[in-house]
Image (cartoon, grey):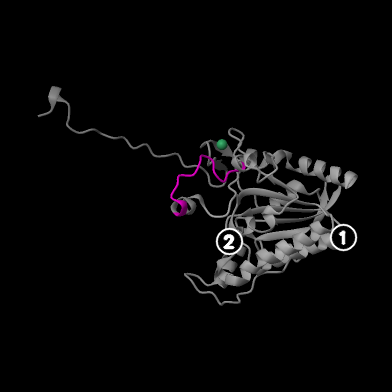
Amino acid sequence: MALFGKPKYTIVKIVKKRSMPNGLWTRCEECGEIIYNKILEENAKVCPKCNFHFTMGAPERINLLIDKDTFIEFDVDLTSCDPLEFKGQKTYKEKLKQEQEATLLREAVITGEGLLEKHKIVIAVTDSRFMMGSMGSAVGEKITRAIEEAISKRLPLVIVSGSGGGARMYEGMLSLMQMAKTSAAINKLQGLGLLFISVLTNPTMAGVMASFASLGDIIIAEPKALIGFTGPRVIEQTIKHKLPEGFQRSEFLLEHGLIDLIIPRKELKSTISKILKYFSNNV
Ligand SMILES: [Zn+2]
């Protein structure tokens, strides 16, 4: 029998959640703050409360770094073919088409030349939204051609990496070969005394990090970006040790000498401009 005449059950009132209009608000992955999208765009996709840097697509990144109306894109139509005729849950061709439609990009990298605070540069930006920014033959070829363009025009090179995927498994060995190809081209550029600034954003991993992204004369990272080769879980399982706090984040890597600077997104353009100015005056 219920004590004091209270019912034995509890009535739980379910309050209907107020629906949020789609596409107007974004929840911060780090602090949970609900941010009005317009505010987020105006703040270069950085959380105004906790400074979390949201993923930025390649076209937005070019708008952020390159002076208005000065960007000339290279190799617009160059895309991967399907040399292995890869078939998984989806074929490689289907996957490429799906990514192209979702991102409105042709491939996981945009390359070109333009002015950065009036300094003429060659720039390449990988986009983690397109097959995790992974490097297949077309990405490797576009990056290599951009490097060669920088060499022939004697221009500084800036590559912004946002690649969680590394080498693209759909192309097997051919994608792994892009690591050597891009690295060899960077080596040639640096041998001629030309400047290469590598900017690492969240995430820069695997085959991209193990090739051109880690070869910058100056390596800049955005705050708290995940940077490494293999993911932390696989490393822990292999070495059977717990990894230190913040392992593979920009701050940890700066402390251990892998990168040179951590620069918040809003100061990235002015910082690169200062470096370009210093090099053009002194080298
Ligand atoms: Zn936040």
The residue sitting at 66% across, 61% down in the picture is 105
Q: Quadrant of ligand 1?
A: top right
Which of the numbered marks, if any, corresponds to residue 209? none
Q: Which residues are magenta?
A: 238-250
Q: Which residue is mark 1?
A: 153
- Is 272 above or below relative to 109? above
Measured from the top left, where is residue 132 in percent x and y? 58, 58
Q: Nearer the viewer, residue 267 or 242?
A: 242
Residue 245 sits inside the magenta stretch: yes
The residue sitting at 44% across, 53% down in the picture is 237
As helix, strand or loop, the secondary structure at mark 2 comes to helix
Amino acid at pointer 1: Lys
Number of callouts: 2
Q: Which residue is mark 2?
A: 131
The residue sitting at 46% across, 52% down in the picture is 239
- Is 144 above or below relative to 205? below
* Mark 1 surroundings within 10 Å by alpha-carbon count, few (fewer than 14), some (14 through 19), many (20 or more): few
Amino acid at pointer 2: Met
Viewer-nearest of labels 2 and 1? 1
Q: Earlier in the sequence, mark 2 or mark 1?
A: 2
- Is 49 above or below relative to 265? above
